[in-house]
Amino acid sequence: MSYTAFLILILIVAIALILIVMVQNPKGGGLSSSFGGGGASSIGGVQNTNTFLDKATWTLAIALFALILLSNFAIPRGGNDNFQLDNKLENVSTTPATNNTVPTQTKDSVN
């Protein structure tokens, strides 16, 4: 699988996870409260909605974590990058520059 495919999957899962979390309400409301929640939270499938949202959140979070870890193996890496870097470093001169004089200001030159 290519790195671009992993990035697209990560984005899709992240957006889906954001949407699922935004639908939930930590105080027991959210999507389930719009179906007549409150005292009768287990009647009419509201409890199933909470269970579905909870399972979907965990599933998407685990999938996102796994995709991020697996995408590390798909990162394109050039085989000759280290060799080229070593050649460039060898060609760099390590001798100091010959013109190391720094112009200094004197009291006479400052107006």
Image (tube, rainbow, N blue to C red):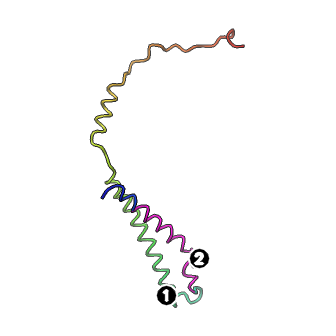
* x, y percent for residue 101: 52, 13
- Give the magenta-colored segment's residue range: 9-35
Residue 27 found in image quarter: bottom right
* 80 versus 23 height, above or below: above
* x, y percent for residue 37: 57, 85
User: Which residue lies under the disc numbered 1?
Assistant: 45
- Image point 67% across, 11% down: which residue? 109
Residue 12 found in image quarter: bottom left
Of residues 28 and 13, the one nearer the viewer is 13
Q: Secondary structure at mark 2?
A: loop
User: Which residue lies under the disc numbered 2?
Assistant: 27
- Residue 16 sits inside the magenta stretch: yes
- Label 1 Cα neighbours within 10 Å, binned few <14 / some 14-19 / many ≥20: few
* x, y percent for residue 35: 56, 85
How far is mark 1 from mark 2, CA to CA? 18 Å
- Amino acid carrying label 2: it is Lys
Q: Secondary structure at mark 1?
A: loop
Label 1 or label 2, whichever lies nearer to me, is 1
